[in-house]
Image (cartoon, rainbow, N blue to C red):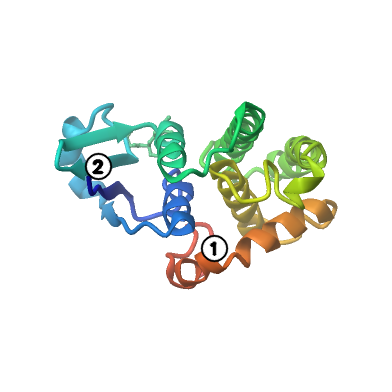
Amino acid sequence: MSTSYEIIYFGIHGRAEPIRLLFALAGVSFTDTAVTREEWKGLKGTMPLFQLPVLVERSEAGERRIPQSQAILRHLARSFGLYGNDEDERLRADVLAETCVDVSAALSALVYGPNKDNPEAVAKYWAETWRTGVAKLDALLAAAPSSAAGLFVCSHPTFADVVAFQVLHTHLVHRPTCLDPAPALRRFHDRMAALPQWQAYLASRRKHEAAPS
Ligand SMILES: N[C@@H](CCC(=O)N[C@@H](CS)C(=O)NCC(=O)O)C(=O)O
């Protein structure tokens, strides 16, 4: 049965970019539908949980609309064989992905919150919150088996490595020096960025919304 995929989101990286990166890693084509804020007013009520991203999966069996970015990622990871090969690996992938959700949420609370222009709050974020996030990610990377060779889960990238790459990328956009104290995470980021499966996508993808124009 052939399946086609459409990811509906706004025209930013946000919560959809790890999903787009996962498609690129799997070599599966997808339609990238970016809705404007104006279009969203009319669409919101038609979406399963009234939010984006939504994955639309179409096959001979019909159409399915899937909400919740983390559920979408895990569903695609299972479909594409990019979750992990056994329960130990899947557990490591889940722990990493949830840690990345926490780290992303903390950055979003800063940059979209009332303190985004407050120098003290910004300094506190990088000195404390981000350092704690780095310590957690560093610990997870250090705990990976030697066969993972610089990745978090196993010898090939999983959906959770994709999520980790994007959370590091987003932080680097905001502060290019933020991985200087974490060389193992920097090596992980650069190794992922060099994946042959990603080169065409990374060269053509939209710039991160926080990147200087
Ligand atoms: N837990 C959900 C959160 C989804 C979410 O917050 N979506 C935001 C954009 S990032 C949205 O749809 N905002 C527009 C709205 O709520 O009307 C997920 O991970 O997909």
Work out whether 195 lies above or below 67.
below
Q: Please report the residue visible at 16 percent of the width from the left and 33 percent of the height from the top.
A: 46
Rendering coords of residue 121 (x, y %): 69, 38
Pointer 1 residue: 211
Q: How crowded is mark 2: few (under 14 residues within 10 Å), some or many (20 or more)?
A: some
Viewer-nearest of discs 1 and 2: 2
Q: Of helix, strand and loop, which one carries label 1? A: loop
In the rendered view, does 170 fall on the left or right side of 190? Answer: left
Q: Residues within 10 Å of mark 1 (few under 14, many from 20)?
A: few
Q: Please report the residue visible at 64 percent of the width from the left and 34 percent of the height from the top.
A: 89
Locate residue 67: give its quadrant: top left
Q: Is residue 42 visible?
A: yes
Disc 1 marks a residue whose amino acid type is: Ala
Point out the tag, 1 or 2, that comes first from the N-terminus: 2
Quadrant field for ligand 1: top left
In the drawing, what numbered circle is on residue 56? Answer: 2
Rendering coords of residue 4 (x, y %): 24, 50
In the rendered view, does 8 fall on the left or right side of 13? Answer: left
The residues bearing labels 1 and 2 have C-alpha atoms spaced at a distance of 29 Å
Q: Of helix, strand and loop, which one carries label 2? A: strand
Q: Which of 154 and 132 is in front in this view?
A: 154
Q: Is residue 178 visible?
A: no
Disc 2 marks a residue whose amino acid type is: Val
Q: Nearer the viewer, residue 176 or 201?
A: 201
Q: Nearer the viewer, residue 62 or 1?
A: 1
Q: Please report the residue visible at 76 percent of the width from the left and 47 percent of the height from the top.
A: 147
**Contact? badges 1 and 2 (CB < 8 Å):** no
Rendering coords of residue 113 (x, y %): 53, 37
In the rendered view, does 151 fall on the left or right side of 199? Answer: right
Rendering coords of residue 135 (x, y %): 80, 38
Work out whether 170 lies above or below 121.
below
